[in-house]
Image (tube, rainbow, N blue to C red):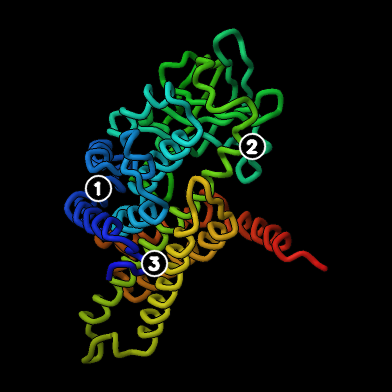
């Protein structure tokens, strides 16, 4: 229905149909194989670029699709029904790099980087987390010192999605103690990446370290002014958290579909197991939780944009939705029994993938802290 919460315009509805069709034909068939290999399907990323989805939130005048946060939620929701690992790589490229880069770059910087990241020729990512600084981003120790027409960066970023295949990264470093943002690419002397860090889930995307050892970055790669990185970071964290929440909704949606079908088909004691109260509980509660998370995520998306902050909404959306994805995947596995635990079926993979959403882009504990502080400010004592 046009104008509903999930498809507020014809454009959003057509986007969902496009991504649904692409996911069914292109994403689903390769998901299990790339999970097994633990590598990113780079060619698939370029096909996403051909659809115009790598610049989803970039204005059309600059080569993007000119869409909004609701559109971003739609894409992450639909892709994650089949391959959350690939979707995570897409998020790192399209949200953590492209969206962030666009809103804090100048025309010259856009001319150099946008065409190739929008096409997928260059895979991109973002470097914030360090071995000694995760949730405590202000504790990062990567430094940048200007030396003529370059900045010299020293430090290591870890657990970075797309590190292995990426060409360019939006990297945060401190200049005289103030967080600043740079584009660092593989042509910068002193820049390297580690071997692939193996992981439990989201294996359709790779993870590694970005190493900057007296790394010389052109001064023209500074995004905004010195010390402005914290503003860029916090603004982009909101759409990151919202799209991660949408991924959890996608996982839950798929798992509800799987357990309903399995419960209808599976026979025990002469009847469908959907007739058993224990199974009905998993199906009914799983569906209810999924619909609640979906409604919250899409509702928050309506009130988020480049000029419209919504930290309370995005923290709440991810805090609520992330555990839902994991719990509904667990319900689906329980309904399927031994078959759900086998790699022959997608539930096992979705169950592994779901856990990261309680950690990445802000832990559940970080969201609880943020919400408590922000709500106290919103409702001060008289």
The local secondary structure at tag 2 comes to loop
Q: Which residue is mark 3?
A: 329
Frontmost residue, 334 versus 299 = 299
| Badge 2 or badge 3: first in the primary sequence | 2
Frontmost residue, 80 versus 263 = 80
Q: Is residue 331 above or below residue 270?
A: above
Q: Label 1 to label 2, Cα distance in Å?
A: 33 Å
**Location of residue 122 in the rendering, given as x and y in whole percent from the top left corner:** 33, 29
Q: Which residue is mark 2?
A: 132
| Badge 1 or badge 2: first in the primary sequence | 1
Q: Are marks 3 and 1 in contact (CB under 8 Å)?
A: no
Q: How many residues crowd around disc 3 within 10 Å: few (fewer than 14), some, or many (20 or more)? A: many
Q: Label 2 to label 3, Cα distance in Å?
A: 32 Å
Q: How many residues crowd around disc 1 within 10 Å: few (fewer than 14), some, or many (20 or more)? A: some
Q: Quadrant of the N terminus?
A: bottom left
Query: Does the image show residue 177?
Result: yes
Frontmost residue, 198 versus 22 = 22
The local secondary structure at tag 1 comes to helix
Q: Quadrant of residue 61?
A: top left
**Location of residue 66 in the rendering, given as x and y in whole percent from the top left corner:** 35, 44
Q: Which residue of the protein is positioned furthest toward the front in this rendering?
A: 61
Q: Which residue is mark 1?
A: 33
Identified at 38% across, 67% down, the residue is 5
Between disc 3 and disc 1, the foreground one is 3
| Badge 3 or badge 1: first in the primary sequence | 1
């Amino acid at each position: 229905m046009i104008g509903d919460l999930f498809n507020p315009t014809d454009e959003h509805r057509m986007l969902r149909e496009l991504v649904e069709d692409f996911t069914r034909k292109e994403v689903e068939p390769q998901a299990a194989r790339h999970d097994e290999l633990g590598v990113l399907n780079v060619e698939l990323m370029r096909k996403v670029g051909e659809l115009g989805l790598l610049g989803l939130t970039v204005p059309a005048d600059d080569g993007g699709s000119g869409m909004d946060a609701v559109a971003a939620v739609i894409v992450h929701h639909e892709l994650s029904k089949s391959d959350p690992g690939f979707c995570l790589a897409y998020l790192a490229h399209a949200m953590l790099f492209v969206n962030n880069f666009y809103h804090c770059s100048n025309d010259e910087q856009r001319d150099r980087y946008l065409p190739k990241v929008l096409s997928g020729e260059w895979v991109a990512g973002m470097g914030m987390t360090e071995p000694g600084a995760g949730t405590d981003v202000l504790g990062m120790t990567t430094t940048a010192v200007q030396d003529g027409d370059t900045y010299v960066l020293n430090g290591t970023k870890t657990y970075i999605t797309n590190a292995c295949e990426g060409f360019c990264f939006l990297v945060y470093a401190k200049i005289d103690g103030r967080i600043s943002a740079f584009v660092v690419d593989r042509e910068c002397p002193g820049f390297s990446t580690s071997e692939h860090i193996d992981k439990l889930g989201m294996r359709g995307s790779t993870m590694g370290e970005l190493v900057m050892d007296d790394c010389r970055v052109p001064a023209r790669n500074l995004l905004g002014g010195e010390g402005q990185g914290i503003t860029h970071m916090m603004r982009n964290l909101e759409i990151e958290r919202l799209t991660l929440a949408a991924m959890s909704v996608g996982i839950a949606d798929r798992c509800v579909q799987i357990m309903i079908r399995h419960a209808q088909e599976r026979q025990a004691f002469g009847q469908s197991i959907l007739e058993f109260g224990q199974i009905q509980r998993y199906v009914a509660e799983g569906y209810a939780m999924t619909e609640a998370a979906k409604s919250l995520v899409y509702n928050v998306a309506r009130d988020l944009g480049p000029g419209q902050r919504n930290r309370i909404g995005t923290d709440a959306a991810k805090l609520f939705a992330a555990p839902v994805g994991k719990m509904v995947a667990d319900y689906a596995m329980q309904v399927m029994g031994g078959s759900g635990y086998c790699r022959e079926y997608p539930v096992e993979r979705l169950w592994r993938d779901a856990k990261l959403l309680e950690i990445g882009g802000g832990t559940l504990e970080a969201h609880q802290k943020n919400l408590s502080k922000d709500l106290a400010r919103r409702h001060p004592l008289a």
